[in-house]
Image (tube, rainbow, N blue to C red):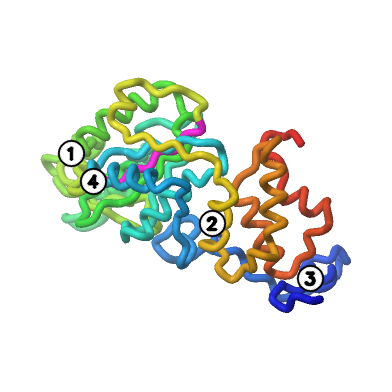
Amino acid sequence: MTDHNQPETAGPDEWRVYRGTGEAGRPPLPEPPPWRTFTGGAHHAGPVPERGARYVFRDEAHLDIVNAAIHLRRPLLVTGPPGTGKSTLAYAVARELGLGPVLHWPVNSRSTLQSALYHFDAIGRLQERGLPHTAGPDDTPDAAIGRFVRLGPLGTALVPSPRPRMLLVDELDKGDLDLAGDLLTVFEDGWFDIPELARIADSVPVVRVRTSDSGGFATVEDGTVQCSQFPVVVITSNGEQDFPPAFLRRCIPLELPRPDGDQLREIVRAHLPDSDLAEIERLIAEFLRLRDTQDLATDQILNAVHLRTGGVDLNERELLNAILHPLNGTG
């Protein structure tokens, strides 16, 4: 007996937009998943938080921990295995609280506190100062210095605003051992100096600089950026290093476990509300079976469900294995 509620399985010629024939053309492209939708041209960097999506917590106590960090204006330190949605939490909070585009600082071994605060293009500044200055009296060389200053994600988060911004410090454990300690003063004080602007503050007290927002600008007075609302800060870590006690004392910790079957079903409903859970129950079961012996991320089951909902036949083992591939290189 046929279940007419199940998505029809598309044949290879139906769902393949690239067919490997070498023939040039412009076939219509499929719509991307909600979490891979972008908005070029807006003051936005990165994927747009999917419309209608919510963050699904396994334990309601975790929701209270997030709220405690917001109330206390303390960084939320989110730990857990890869793929548990640590970064996604920041986008969900920003969307629900109306905090604007997420300011994303992806940390690596070369990251420094200054790069997160601001960048000064010293070479461009020197090159300009070597050119004849022919502008009007109100456009002095010092007044033009703002063109060479760009605030980083942390610096932009500290720009005065009527509502706090969301700052995502992603994978802080990948940074230098001293980086967490370097953040302490800024997190405590909520301000920082830009020496290049402070040196000319007597003659040019107000400078307009660029921010991390696409096309964004901010005004810096007397070379100091001082927040009026401390940002909502989400720091993620995969546990690759231990942070100093002084840093941990200033954070609210949240450890996210791997989602169980019920949580996975809720996540699918939140991200793909049109999917038939009875049809994709096999995919969830397969995902859980594979995850018992290897590392998998939650977005991998979402990828599988999105394809299956679109009519792609995932009974082909090689295709399914490519989607649910192990993150630790074993299988």
Q: Look at 52% across and 26% down and name the residue there.
A: 240
| Badge 4 amino acid | His
Q: Is residue 48 above or below residue 166?
A: below
Give SS at disc 4: helix
Q: Residue furthest right?
A: 21
| Badge 2 amino acid | Ile
Does any portion of residue 112 appear in the rendered image?
A: yes
Question: Disc 1 vs disc 4: Cβ atoms closer than 8 Å?
Answer: no
Magenta-colored span: 231-238
**Comes first in the chain, label 2 or label 1:** 1
- The quarter holding residue 272 reads bottom right
Q: Residue furthest bottom?
A: 4
Q: Look at 74% across and 70% down and name the residue there.
A: 311
Residue 150 in the image: state x and y as whole percent: 35, 46
* Front of the two marks 1 and 4: 4
| Badge 1 amino acid | Ile
Magenta region, mostly helix, strand or loop?
A: strand
In magenta stretch: residue 237: yes
Q: Can you identify the residue that label 4 sits on?
A: 71
Q: Is residue 131 left or right of residue 73?
A: right
Q: Residue furthest left?
A: 202
Residue 252 in the image: state x and y as whole percent: 32, 35
Q: Is residue 163 left or right of residue 1?
A: left
If the image is split into quadrants, where does the C terminus sit?
top right
Q: Can you identify the residue that label 1 sits on?
A: 200
* Front of the two marks 4 and 2: 2
Q: Can you identify the residue that label 2 sits on?
A: 267
Q: Look at 26% across and 49% down and name the residue there.
A: 144
Rounded to the nearest angstrom, the CA distance separating label 1 from label 4 is 38 Å
Rounded to the nearest angstrom, the CA distance separating label 3 from label 1 is 67 Å
